[in-house]
Amino acid sequence: MAALRCLTDRMRGWRRCGTVLLAVVLAGGARAEPRHRIVSLNLCTDQLLLQLVPARDIAGLSPLARDCAYSVMCLQARSVPAIRPSAEAVVAARPDLVVGGRYASVTALLAARQAGMPVELFDPVERLADVPDQIAAVANAAGVPERGRALVDAFRARLAAYPVSAGGNGAPSAMIYAANGFVTRAGSLADDMLVRAGFRNAANGLDGRHALGVSLESLLARPPDLLVVARSDVGISLAQAVLDHPALRDAFPAAHRLSLPDRLWLCGLPQTLDTLDKLIAARKALETSR
């Protein structure tokens, strides 16, 4: 507004007006300047960048971005370089921005900082309500706030259209069961999605609540209404063999079993709501089958 008033008041002189305009640009415009050599060392920031900035502005993504076992944007990621999460590789890429997770690739991130490169770190998203904030934060760091606002507005509008569900004691139970019998408990994005879909997370009520996994025997002794099988969908391993055990197939037929690949649970993305749709559909199918 100061710049506009200056332009309409010639009595103050064009020189002063030019000074005000310059101040406005330096104060607000520089922050929104798009970055053109961005390096990402985190799977979640990889996938957000692919939806926020042109591929030509990405100097490197983590190798996981191209792995369809973990990334929903794996095909799009193949159009940009992959970069090893090492100090040498990151510094050699000469990025004008490095983004990553707070708890991984620590050495590479430290080297980037010491080399004077801008570094932005992001925490894992643990609730659907936090996804818009992370989208906006990555977009602002990359200098594309308008694109970020568009994705945020679309996500919030879609999330608001879902009915609110408490996932209380009267709700059907569900458990996410992964390789080695790993389960997902409270304090995670997947747990929040179960509750939002109208389920009660059965893993939160099991003994040994701090353990990472649940044995097949314990699962069959207290079966949830719905077993969500989380597999990588790539290759064969002993760790995943438990997911195909005949006892599981017998205990959880048809409507009581839902298979969702790991990549659908790992990051808070616009596509995360597609997974929520699948969970809601599974709950409705379960209720219909009763």
Image: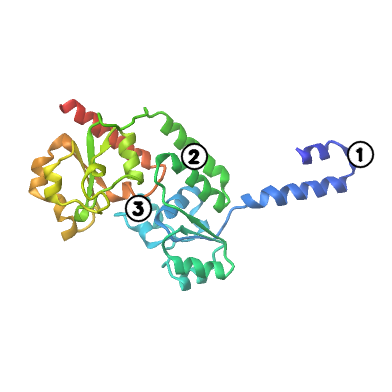
**Mark 3: secondary structure:** loop
Relative horizontal placement of residue 63, taking residue 117 as reference (left or right) = left
Q: Residues within 10 Å of mark 2 (few under 14, many from 20)?
A: some
Q: Residue at x 33, y 31 (%)?
A: 166
**Mark 1: secondary structure:** helix
Q: Identify the residue under disc 2.
A: 152
Q: Identify the residue under disc 1.
A: 11
Q: Residue at x 17, y 34 (%)?
A: 255
Spot occupied by residue 29 in the image (x, y as percentages of width and height):
67, 49
Amino acid at pointer 3: Ser
Q: Give the Cα distance between marks 2 and 3.
A: 20 Å
Amino acid at pointer 1: Met
Q: Identify the residue under disc 3.
A: 71
Spot occupied by residue 268 in the image (x, y as percentages of width and height):
40, 46
Q: Do we see residue 177 in this rendering?
A: yes
Q: Is residue 110 above or below residue 267?
A: below
Q: Nearer the viewer, mark 2 or mark 3?
A: 2
**Residue 105 appears in which quarter of the rendering?**
bottom left
Q: Is residue 111 above or below residue 280?
A: below
Q: Quadrant of the C terminus?
A: top left
Relative horizontal placement of residue 216, taking residue 120 as reference (left or right) = left
Q: Quadrant of the N terminus?
A: top right
Q: Residues within 10 Å of mark 1 (few under 14, many from 20)?
A: few
Q: Residue at x 13, y 50 (%)?
A: 216
**Mark 2: secondary structure:** helix
Q: Earlier in the sequence, mark 1 or mark 2?
A: 1
